[in-house]
Image (tube, helix red, strand yellow):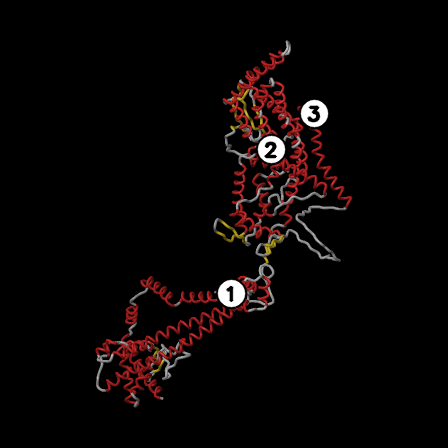
Amino acid sequence: MDLTVHTYGHIDSMFYTLNAIAMLMNHKFGEAVMLVMTMSSVAYYAMRMSYAGADAYKAHLAKVVGMVAMVYFMLLPRADMMIYDHVSKKRDKVDNLPLGFALPVGILEGFGDLLTGGFEQAFTQVDSTNYRDYGSVFGARLIQESRSWRIRSPEFLENMGNFIDRCVMLDAMIGYHYTPEELLKSDDIWGLIKAKAATLRQTSVRIGKTKSLMSCKAAADDVIDPAFRLEIESLEKKSRGSDIAEAGQAVYVLRTFDRLTSNFKKNIELSFSSYVGSNANAENLIRQQMMMNAIKNYSDDYGYARASATQESNWRIAGDLAGTYLPILMSVLKGLVYSSFIFMLPMLIMSGGWGRYLGYLTLVASFQLWAPLNAVLNMFIDIYSSTTLKAISDQIVSFSTMSRIGNYTDKIVAVASGLQLAIPFLAFSIIQGGVGGFIHLAGTITGASQSAASQAANESVTGNKGFDNYSAGNRQLYNQGGFKTDWNESYAAGASSYQHTDGTMEKVTGGGNTLFQSGMGFTASGGATAYRQEDSRHAQVSEGIQAAESMHQQDLRSISSAQSKHFAKSADYISHLAQREHNGESFAYEKMGEQGEALRQAVNHAKQLHDTKGYGWQQSASASAEIYASAGLNAGIFSEGISTKAGVSAENNSNQSTGGGTHISRDNNAEQNKSNLEKAMANSTWAKENSIDTGYSDSVKESYEELQRAERQASISKQQVDDWHQAKNVIDSQGASSSRDMYQEVAEGIKRDYDVDAKTAQKMADQRSPEAQKVWRKLQDNDHYVQNIVSNISHSRAEVSGEIATEKLDRFTNENSGKISQEVGKDVKQYAANQGMNIDNFKDNIQNAGKNLQEKHVEVIAENATQ
């Protein structure tokens, strides 16, 4: 017959125990122990027989014969044993075990297995999870375990929290898609939410490192639903190898074999169907539980009466201990008792063998009653709990029923675990033929109830009642009370508040909204005076505007001075040339092209004024220079500080009527004439070729460059003035909507800089002492907010003007120059010729009319200059 050890979970511990026995018994050490003990025992009893009487030696001889029989018939022969685990359906084999251990243990284990099978058949309901295949209270333990099925992925947890806040709570409170009652009573919360998710409202969704907004409907279909499937797969993978996944298998496999299939989902469906009556599939049950845990964390309720709560508490404590240790207690005790056979070996040999051996087998036999007794206990628990749980749930696992189901399964597991603690004592007492085990079992059941009833009765009689109180580290001294009455109503449901280490108060409302409160009285101090940050910034802006405008006015004065100097140098040059021409000399103006023509006209006008009006050479030259050099200086940013002495203002475009009635619209090229005149007077090479002192050219060039520098500097300072005014508008707009008191920073600065306590620092800040003012100025200096605004404005302007904008424009021109026709004039001439128009005649008429207008314009300016 096969010698077998039967386990109900934890096959590895039993395998290693039997393998250790075989290894030690087959080692040289085991053989040496048996040899030494046998020889010692023979020598001892031989000596005792030599001193014994005629008939007394027979008793000693019988012990020697019994010892030799035990050694040769029970210890030296070897046998093999199989190990079968009925929960995980795994098996393994251990070779070379002593026959004296393997034979009785195998027989008793076989008897216990037959007894367990018979008890299971007699005492177990057809559709229940029996002890032999599932272990103790399997269904209730699985339902209790299901309450801890929560979303564990950080990304999914964040997305689900945002989804519930935006897409579930709001819809439930509005009641259009579904009401809170429908949500609580639904047996498929996620199915209800997904089917009726809003399409317009959006929620925040994180996918990897990217965070975006999606509609509730899209988030449910594309993000939450796939994440649920991954979370269920992760839970199933995590449970692989546990009793929940391996229990209920039909085929035995080797202990080291990893099954490819799992009964995880099957056992979930079986347990909920047997206990709750729910016919939902495993994935829906897991998703339902995760969804309920995501909406709200459940907590165990206390009983309605103090006695019931105390009794359940006693059972719960015992149940927690039993629930932790009982699943492995049978395997542990079996392993300890079976391994003690090694230590029993010397005593069995020395004592003659059989008396102690039978005592050892009695202890082994008691283990075989554990499984049948647990089967009977399972039957009562299953019958009682399945009926009650079905009545509670009405065969639906919903938000409203899961709390009561969870509380009741906790009680079932606690009571069952407490009763299981008595089974080891009961089994051993039955083997010994006593009734002490039943007395111990009755004491276990009634002890908690009697203690709870006694305590509740005492509180009811004395009126000193306490319920759910917790007190630790309390101390009261010299308390006095007065006539205090407070009948104000106070009610808070589902709300909580928490104060952070920095003083910020966080409050979570019953609807799930999170509120934060900080500032004065929470994270900052307040006093009799205020140090307004916006006042400091307004002052910084005002000072910045004053400084910028002052710098700009100085630059304008520099322009005026440089312009006067440049006019004087230009007049000296023109006067010198006019006098020399008047004396009969001539100069080759044509070598400088348009520039020389501009200089020739200025010299001719000076001569004309001298000859026709009788002006002096210097006066005539000054008038002529101002006519050309002042073009364009009255426009733009310089209009307020610069004007020509001649009262002339030149514009780029003019509409003039000629004497012949011809209306001409043209560009008078004022800026071009001015530029040509400046370049001609600065041409020292031409002056040297015409025997003109180059000092005139150098002076004009130097004064012109000085004027240009002054103009550029004035332009920069004007832009800075505009930047500061824009910054002022920004500060004014922000100050109207935000305000911050820097009192706390000032007080902290006084404490830090002057090494005073907090009270002294507060007093100095309230009085605005010199120390407080110094700290306040230091804080203002360290506040670069205004400077940053001005810098940002300057940078933004530089992007659309100045060198950066010019560089962008040049780059754009280079990239697109090929797209523009370079022969536009040729096309225009061709079109005019096709239409019968003579372009050259138009051009000559325009040039003649322009020349006449220019001469009239110069005469008018010259007359005005002399008045």
Q: Return the mark for residue 327.
A: 2
Q: Amino acid at mark 1?
A: Leu
The amino acid at mark 3 is Gly
Residue 375 drawn above or below residue 857 = above
Q: Looking at the image, which is closer to me, 708 or 605?
A: 708
Q: Say whether residue 676 is left or right of residue 392.
A: left
Quadrant including the N terminus: top right
Q: CA distance from mark 1 to mark 2?
A: 68 Å
At mark 3, the secondary structure is: loop
Between 208 and 792, the one nearer to me in the picture: 792
Mark 1–mark 3 distance (CA, rounded to whole Å): 89 Å
Location of mark 3 (residue): 434
Label 1 SS: helix
Residue 59 location (% of width, % of height) = 63, 13
Left/right of residue 335 with respect to residue 448 in the rendered view = left
Residues packed near mark 3 inside 10 Å, few (<14), some (14 to 19) or many (20 plus) = few
Q: Quadrant of residue 488?
A: bottom right
